[in-house]
Image (cartoon, grey):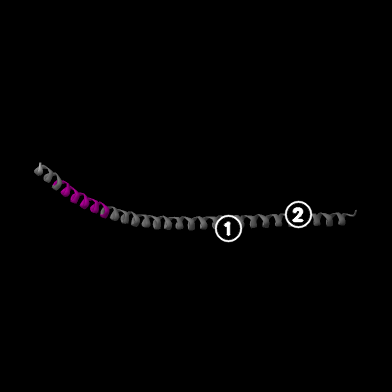
Amino acid sequence: MSHEEIEAICLAEDEALQKILLATKKADEVIEAAQNEGKETIASTLLRAETEIAYFTHTIDQKAMGEAMELASTTANRQATLRARAERRIEAAASLIVERIVNL
């Protein structure tokens, strides 16, 4: 082989090596860009999820508070009704006791 043919082969090999290096560099850049985009997407999704959790937690707390207040009101009404009935029965029982004592 002549010296010129050897130089041409060496030049072709150098060009091929440069193309490989350039392709590898571009591939690394694409991979890095994809990873960064993935990280941003994950961060954005996480933030949205945390916001939704806070919203739903607040909503559930408000609903639970409303239901607790309604239950407390119902319980207070039921307690008052039972107390009034018990007082009437106490009066009736007292009347019966007095009547039996007087009739003895």
Rate crowding at label 2 as few (under 14), some (14 to 19) or many (20 or more) other CA atoms within 10 Å.
Answer: few
Q: Position of residue 91 (x, y in %)?
A: 15, 49
Circle 2 sits in a helix, a strand or a loop, which is it? Answer: helix
Which of the 4 image quarters holds residue 65? bottom left
Horizontal side of 30 relative to 87 (left or right) equals right
**Which label belongs to residue 17?**
2
Circle 1 sits in a helix, a strand or a loop, which is it? Answer: helix
Rate crowding at label 1 as few (under 14), some (14 to 19) or many (20 or more) other CA atoms within 10 Å.
Answer: few
- On the image, numbered disc 1 is attached to which residue? 37
- The single residue placed furthest to the left in the displayed view is 102
Q: Position of residue 86 (x, y in %)?
A: 21, 49
Q: Magenta span has 90?
A: yes
Q: Amino acid at mark 2?
A: Leu
Q: Quadrant of the C terminus?
A: top left
Q: Position of residue 96 (x, y in %)?
A: 15, 46
- The single residue placed furthest to the top in the displayed view is 104
Q: Magenta span has 79?
A: yes
In the image, which residues are magenta?
77-94
